[in-house]
Image (cartoon, helix red, strand yellow):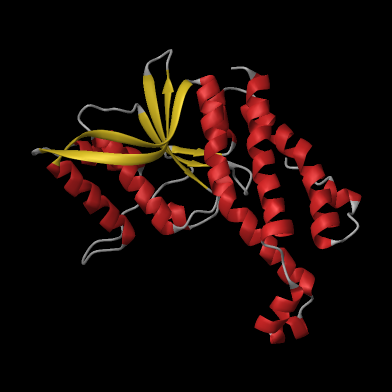
Amino acid sequence: MDNNLVSKGIAKVITELMDSVMNKVLVTDPFIPEEHHAKKPLYAALVPDEIFKGSHFERRFVTPFGSAWERLAHIVASSHLGKASLQASVEGNILDERLKRIQEILNAEDHATKGQKKRKPNWDDDLAYVLKGGGEPIPTTVICDLLAEDIKNHKKYAFELKAPLPNSDQAKVSKEKMLKLMAMENRPVEQAYFALVYNPYGKKSDYAWSYPKKWFDISTDKSILIGDELWEFLGGEGTYQNFINEINSLGSKYKELIYRDYLHIIPVEEVVNNNLK
């Protein structure tokens, strides 16, 4: 992997995102105090404008960052593994009994049925149960967030890329897609992964967000990649630290810009230099 190429790619994605956000909040869609006062006079009377100005910025930042993660993963996987595509369509035949078993698993993990406890998620057990199903082949298409191919080993990997705190529905849809990919008769992918772009809890064993745990055993399922696991898989050893270094090198610049030009506050050095670890 060309580390310099990856670094430039990461910097390009983050810079384009931040420049677009700054242009929006400063030029095309700024926070207008008079408009805020007119629409929410009670709020304006009780809470400083700066609080709502921050919320205005956050809404225009968080949504586009979702696509930025996908672009970053695409750059890293393309550079290291050889090929990658976003929103990739994977086609194959799945035996009809396997499709029924996938729905059976999802229903059992969603709620308890009469006389039975709710099913605990276990990727190996769930997949093994699905693969025992037979029947007639049904043409099926799955759209995965990222499809990467290791051209040296001729193996493909599918990834459901999610923010670190996904909701239950997102995790459920991802598991359904992953099981379908692995149930296809032609086995188009070596493995399908539920991939969280970083871990706000630190260690994988400490991951505490409850919603995806309804569908996955986060600590033990081999179909789970979180934070450094994901980036090292896509880009090889050192990729996560490379990613952190690029984020931190750009962070101070943009935080100071936001303080001065958007919030009109003199930045505090220790806040500006509060880097990602």
Split into 4 quadrants, where in the image is the C terminus? top right
Given residues 214 and 149, the one toward you in this image is 149
Given residues 50 and 273, the one toward you in this image is 50
Residue 271 percent across, percent down from the top left: 84, 52
Q: Quadrant of residue 220?
A: top left
Query: With respect to residue 44, does 223 lie above or below?
Result: above
Residue 128 percent across, percent down from the top left: 25, 37
Asked whether residue 229 is in view, the answer is no
Asked whether residue 221 is in view, the answer is yes
Residue 186 percent across, percent down from the top left: 22, 26
Residue 103 percent across, percent down from the top left: 23, 52
Q: Quadrant of residue 188?
A: top left
Q: Please report the residue visible at 30 percent of the width from the left and 34 percent of the height from the top.
A: 90
Split into 4 quadrants, where in the image is the N terminus? top right
Q: Please report the residue visible at 70 percent of the width from the left and 87 percent of the height from the top.
A: 42
Is 110 on the left-hand or right-hand side of 68? left
Q: Please report the residue visible at 17 percent of the width from the left and 38 percent of the height from the top.
A: 139
Given residues 29 and 67, the one toward you in this image is 29
